[in-house]
Each structure stands twice: as C-alpha cells, then as structure tokens.
Image (cartoon, rainbow, N blue to C red):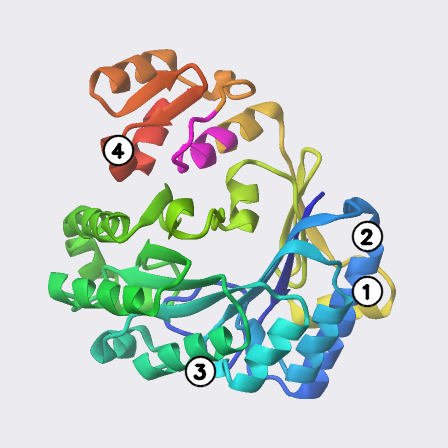
Amino acid sequence: MRHLYVHLPFCAHRCGYCDFVTLVGGDREQHARYVDALLAELELERGLLAGKLETVFLGGGTPTFTAPGELERLLAALPPAAEVTVEANPETVTAEMARLLSRNGVNRVSIGAQSFHMPLLEVLERRARPDDVRRAFHHLRDAGLDNLSLDLLYGIPGQSPADLERDLEDALALGPEHLSCYELEAKPGTRFAHTHGDELARQSEAMEGYFERVVAVLTAAGYRWYETANFCRRPEVAGGRDLRARHNLGYWLGRDYLGLGIGAVSTVAGRRWRNTPKLAAYLGAAGRGEAPARALEPLDEDVQGRERLLLGLRLDEPLPLAGVESALDPSALARLERLGLAERLETGLTLTERGRFLGGAVTAELLA
C-alpha cells in the first residue's frame, strides 16, 4: 500500500455536529502514550506498506492540538511520502507550530475554517474566529508551505445566500490552493442533530441552489471542480501543479490504504477493518505488543464494484467500466443518458454537469 492514514483524536472541544472519534483534552503524558501506541501499530503493520509512499494524512480530532513535542516525534518517525497532509484547527496554528510542520516534512495543511461569519461559527460551536483563520494561513505561508486547503460548510442554520457569498469571498481572498465545501449534515446521535435537525430538514431543498453557487463562484475564480465537494487551482494558474488532494484521490479511486489509531479504518486486499475506538483498549494492546481489537468486514467483488462506482463517479474524470459492470444497471444508465445526467465515453462512464449537481441520487439509480 502507498497510502497511510494516522488518526490523532485529541481536541480542545467537541463541536456539536462532529461524529468523528475524538477525545477532549489530554495532557502531554497521555499524548505521549498515544504516540507510542501509534508507532507500535506502525511497526506491526509496516510490512503492508510499500517502500515508498504516495501519501500520509494526519487527521483527527485536531492533530495540531497534540502536544508539539509528541507531534514532532510522530512526524519524524513516519515514513516519508510525496504528499504529507496535516489537518489543523486555526486557533492551534501558531508561528511555532507552522515551523514544526514545515521542518518535519509536512507539505500540505488542511485548515478547518468552516465559516468567516461570527454568528455562524457560534451556531457550529467553533472556537476559532475569522482572524484566527487568517492568522493561521499567514503563519503557514511564512513557514514556506505552498499547498494549503480551506474547509467551508454551507447550509448552516441561519446562513443566508449573502452569508455564503461572503464566506467564499473571504476564502478566495486568502488564495488557497484547495477548497473543500461541504453541506452541513445533522449526523445521528450528535448534539447538532438534536438541536438543529428539523431546521436542516426544512432547508434541504434550498441546498441545491447553495451548492450550485459554490461551484459557480469557485470555477469562475480559476478552481477545478474535480470532486463533488472539492476544488483545486487549475494547473494553468498554479504553475503546472496538480493540486488535487492525492490522499483522498486514493479513496475515491478505490486504492488500498492503512489506517493507524483509534477508530481508524484500513482497506487491504479485499478486507476492511476498523480499529477499536476505545483509547484504553488501544493503549493496552500496544503495551502488549499486539494489534488493537478490530471489526472485520470482508469485501467481495460485488461490494468493491459498487463502492468503486459510487466513489469514482464523484470525480470529474471518466470512470473506467472494467470491474464495475456487475454493479451497473444498464437500463438505469440508458434512462439517465436520455435525461442528460450520465454519459458513456470511450474512456469510461461520467456524469454530466447536471448529473454531478444531483450527485448521490444519480449514482444510486445506476446501482444494479
């Protein structure tokens, strides 16, 4: 495998809409024990990794909330890769943290901005303020990082079309190489679902218009809409660089990857496993020199074909049909072609622009 994911679960605060495996707080000793366990798991599984990796991705949680000394120790011990990404919450990115990332091989940072509008940040229970986002961005630039991504959310309760326009303007003013723009979801079991679920359901019909506006603004600004929710500067305005998120491309293209840490998922040679989300169990297994407890899921050819179809059609490049034919409903494809939502090309299957706006509803129709 050429793709490695590392989960750092610690956060200063758990936002109400978050359903990731996270832990609030923790001191340096706990962070150190967790890094020890990550490196122990890496040694157990190192034989699964290729000699040279394409990508390493540190996600969370908030990786940059991890005690700086422990984060640096982890980064120094991880195998090198062409793309090394770290997720960061803006308030955790000081000038010192930016230099730490830069000197330890990190060449891409994904900043969780979510919004530049204070009332919306308060709805989201975010700690960072708009100036924290700008300050973090400039610290990273000063440290020499030239591949920065911003995450934005739309469909936030109380957000108007004008609020969305201002968020896009503020994001573009920073000149990021990449933007990820997601519709806010009320994930089951979260505080946000309990508080705002009904409101999000009521406004769901308006989200198609918000989505179309996001695409229109960002493509007009020179960004390639290369995946349903992701945009990167086009090579002709980025010095010829391909600025797509290579780690996430690995997921969308159905490549195998190894995940380390609590709750981390791995997909390896037709099998998928998920590590225990329980910190004590994870640390205990590492202390015994054992792999953590894992939930196993076999992936037969049918499941792999369906996932390949669902994920591959999120991209703006045709999906080769080899290996996904059994997952495809030919009559549904013919109907969607007549409706101008899908198209068969010599190089594979793709959705039209209108089909991409409808996204998951179209791909669900295509499944056999």
Residue located beneath label 2 in the image: 46
Of labels 2 and 1, earlier in sequence is: 1
Image spot of residue 215 (x, y percent):
25, 48
Of labels 1 and 3, earlier in sequence is: 1
- Checking the image for residue 91, the label placed there is 3
Of labels 3 and 4, earlier in sequence is: 3
Give the residue at x 72% y 43%.
Answer: 1
| Dot 1: element | helix
- Checking the image for residue 232, the label placed there is none
The answer to whether 59 is drawn above or below residue 97 in the figure is: above
Compute the Cα span from label 2 to label 1.
10 Å
Residue located beneath label 4 in the image: 353
Residue type at mark 2?
Arg
Compute the Cα span from label 1 to label 4.
46 Å
Please identify, in this view, whether the residue under mark 1 or under mark 3 is nearer the observer: 3
Give the residue at x 40% y 22%.
Answer: 349
Query: Looking at the image, do the residues carrying marks 4 and 2 touch, with CB atoms under 8 Å apart?
Result: no
Of all residues shown, which one is farthest toward the right? 289
Span highlighted in magenta in the image: 308-319
